[in-house]
Image (spheres, grey):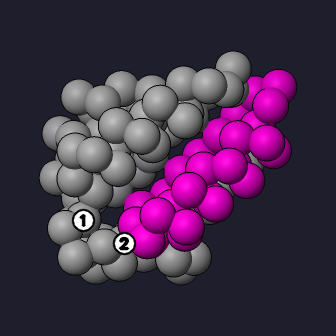
Amino acid sequence: MEQTFLIISEYGVHARPATRLVNLAMSFNSDISLTALGKTVNLKSIMGLMSLGIYKGEIVKISVTGSDAEKAIVALSDFMITEGLGRLA
């Protein structure tokens, strides 16, 4: 399963929401990755996510595979939208 977002936060994906996003991803058993700027990282890795340097206007794709993929993609999508990080692209 995958979902694509346009980053709308003025500050992009900065430390505080990135940490919360990684913690949310870690609460699922599924493999979760994020692709942006031509690179794919494990969304359960704060260093991987922060290394991308995602700013406002970037397109990111969250991909999930595993036993709880549906729950994970819904929770991560809700987080992106409710926290004002991104909107569906």
Q: Is residue 76 above or below residue 29?
A: below
For badge 1, the amino acid type reads Gly
Q: Under tag 2, what secondary structure?
A: strand
Q: Residue at x 81, y 44 (%)?
A: 70
Q: Under tag 1, what secondary structure?
A: loop
| Residue 12, label in figure | 1
Q: x%, y% of residue 50?
A: 21, 41
Horizontal side of residue 26 vs 58, given as left or right: right
For badge 2, the amino acid type reads Ile
Q: Residue at x 34, y 56 (%)?
A: 36
Q: Dots 2 and 1: beta carbons under 8 Å?
A: yes
Classify mark 2: residues with Cα within 10 Å, few (<14), some (14-19) or many (20+). Answer: many
Residue 28 can be seen, yes or no: yes
Residue 5 can be seen, yes or no: no
Q: Is residue 25 above or below residue 80?
A: above
Q: Is residue 24 above or below residue 34?
A: above
Mark 2, residue position:
7
Q: CA distance from mark 2 to mark 1?
A: 6 Å
- Region in magenta: 60-86
Residue 78 belongs to the span the image colors magenta: yes
Residue 67 belongs to the span the image colors magenta: yes
In the foreground, 1 or 46: 46
In the foreground, 81 or 60: 81
Q: Is residue 23 above or below residue 18?
A: above
Q: x%, y% of residue 49?
A: 30, 39
Counting residues from the start of the chain, the first of labels 2 and 1 encountered is 2
Image quadrant where residue 41 sits: top left
Q: x%, y% of residue 15?
A: 22, 44
